[in-house]
Image (tube, rainbow, N blue to C red):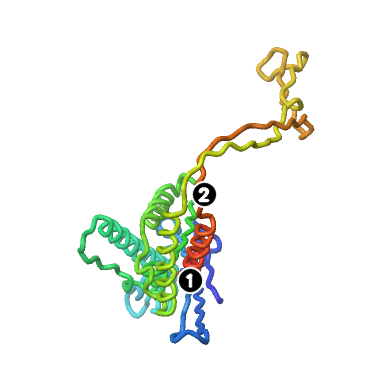
Amino acid sequence: VPTREAATLMNERSSRAHTLLIFRLRQQASHMAEEKESMLILADLGGSEKLTKSGANEGVKGPGAIDAGGEEEVGRVTWDEYYKSRERVTETTNINKGLLVLKRCVYALRDATSQANQKRRQKLRVPFYDSMLTQLLEPALGGPSRTVILVCASQEPEHAEETVGTLRFGEAVRLVERSGETDNVSKAVKVAVAAIDAEVKEIEVLIKEKEHWVTRTTKKKNVVSTMDTGGTQLAAEEEMDLGGKGAVIFVKDEGNSTKVETEAEVTGQFAVGAEEERARMEALLDKRRRLLGKGR
């Protein structure tokens, strides 16, 4: 992917743009009536810039010329030179605009999540189409998507304001909950999940009928270390940093300490009588998770 780099006072190799890499996977099995499409978006967002810090506005020229009298002109700047001198400023504007709209989208999604939890029905507008960046990121920010964000922040005190803003943005992203979890689940998968749910309910009835609690006492063996090696030693003649003698030395434990086997009785309550049914139900629930793409 061709990229553009330029030096600023904040970054010697600034990419001067946001970078998105989008993968689309379309597949259709023989038993599927509709084609299934998945998407993976990798986004490398440029950092926000202040012109006073990045110096991107240095060397900017104004178009036109200074009339020195008569036919003489001093310092003529053509339109090509004007736009050329503003390249870094234009890049800064585009970077900051994308980040600002992204922030507004995340905050709107966060507020929508808060209203949903409070059972409010007010419709909030999420400004995905206010910038090209958020328009491309819309599938990853809303609906049945899974999104991971890595926040990169600076430790330098002079960048404290940007660091705090970045961390607050990451906190806002954490509060967003995805919606429409089953929107792109095929009809065949829904039928299979419904059948599994019905069978699980039948098994739960059998478990209630068969299962009961018993008290059992078992013996458990453990191997413990006596910690007779390592520890501390007193060097009576060694001078200490703060003066005086008698330094304490911490000796590394090489793992050669004496091991002793101990045995203890453990008493507890155990559910018995429906072991086969519980194993069958666990297998069905695992199958249900895999059908919905949730893993374990």
As helix, strand or loop, the secondary structure at mark 1 comes to: helix
Give the crowd class for mark 2: few <14, some 14-19, many >=20 residues within 10 Å. Answer: few
In percent of the image, x 44 and y 69: which residue is there? 196
In the rendered image, the quadrant that contains the N terminus is bottom right
The residues bearing labels 1 and 2 have C-alpha atoms spaced at a distance of: 30 Å
Q: Position of residue 148 (x, y in %)?
A: 47, 61
Which residue is more in the foreground, 49 or 68? Answer: 49
Q: Quadrant of residue 55?
A: bottom left
In percent of the image, x 40 and y 59: which residue is there? 205
Instruction: Determine which of the numbered discs, if any, sits on residue 291 in the image.
Output: 1
Q: Is residue 204 above or below residue 224?
A: below
Which residue is more in the foreground, 215 or 7? Answer: 215
Q: Position of residue 38 (x, y in %)?
A: 48, 76
Going by the numbered disc 2, the residue's amino acid type is: Val
Instruction: Determine which of the numbered discs, if any, sits on residue 272 in the image.
Output: 2
Q: Position of residue 254 (x, y in %)?
A: 77, 34
Q: Is residue 187 visible?
A: yes
Q: Position of residue 168 (x, y in %)?
A: 38, 51
Which residue is more in the foreground, 201 or 48? Answer: 201
- In the image, taking residue 183 as reference, residue 120 lies left or right, namely left
Going by the numbered disc 1, the residue's amino acid type is: Leu
Give the crowd class for mark 1: few <14, some 14-19, many >=20 residues within 10 Å. Answer: some
Q: Quadrant of residue 243?
A: top right
Q: Quadrant of residue 276?
A: bottom right
As helix, strand or loop, the secondary structure at mark 2 comes to: strand
In front: label 1 or label 2 = 2
In percent of the image, x 39 and y 67: which residue is there? 141
